[in-house]
Image (cartoon, rainbow, N blue to C red):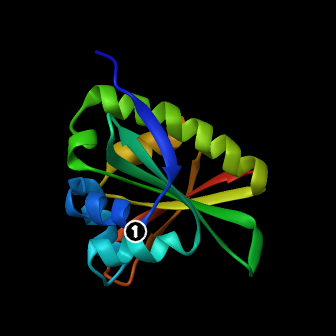
Amino acid sequence: MTDTITTRPATEADVVDIADRLSPPDLINLQALLPATPVDALKSMLTRGECEAVYINGRPEALFGCSSYASRPARGFPWFAASREAYNSEARIADLVRLSQKLLDRWQAKYAELLTMNDTRNASYGDWLSLLGFKAVSELPTTSGHMFNLYFKGAL
């Protein structure tokens, strides 16, 4: 049976559902970046730009967002969070990789530069970002003391 995958603008209910079932790498990333609960951290992302909920077979399984700031109108900050169920399924990860390319193409058309961060302890996401055309440009400590790689995509 083929999975049915749909997207729609994310709601607070989508965030609460996914935050409750967040994949281990996404939980680690959020905890290292933001001094908030996963649900509060993800809720704050809803107001910072675009956020799409990815539904697989009628259930929210991932969030893709691209934050923007008035002080940097040509720069978008894409981010991603998945459920444990999606993260633990190779087929669903493959679907999410394909979908992420479509969303990044849309955001790249809107923003000249895309900038994102990844916890250095999460090598698989770094590989994913590289596959999507991002280049690691530096390593930065967060306020929690964990090291993150800064990734860039666009014209230098």
Number of numbered discs: 1
| Viewer-closest of 8 and 83 | 8
Q: Quadrant of the C terminus?
A: bottom right
Whole-percent x, y for residue 77 in the image: 59, 63
Residue pictured at 54% horizontal, 60% vertical: 116
Mark 1 highlights which residue?
12
Where residue 63 appears, x then y in whole percent?
42, 54
> Would residue 156 be seen by someone viewing this image from the given angle?
no
Q: As shown in the figure, which amino acid type bears the numbered disc 1?
A: Glu
Please, is residue 43 above or below residue 8 in the view? below
Asked if residue 86 can be seen in this view, the reply is yes
> Image height check: is 4 above or below 84?
above
Out of 135 and 13, give the one closest to the viewer. Answer: 13
10 Å crowding of disc 1: few (<14), some (14-19), many (20+): few
In the visual, does 129 lie left or right of 72? left
Q: Look at the picture and state if 124 lies above or below 52.
A: above
Residue nearest the viewer, comparing 68 with 7:
7
**Residue name at image x 21 percent, y 42 percent:** 85
Rendered location of residue 16, percent (x, y)? 29, 66
Percent x, y of residue 83: 27, 50
**Secondary structure beneath disc 1?**
helix
Residue 66 in which image quadrant: bottom right
Q: Quadrant of the N terminus?
A: top left
Tell me: 96 left or right of 155: left
Q: Nearer the viewer, residue 98 or 19?
A: 19
Q: Residue at x 34, y 25 (%)?
A: 3
Task: Identify which residue is drawn at 43% across, 36% down.
Answer: 96
Horizontal side of residue 10 vs 41, given as left or right: right
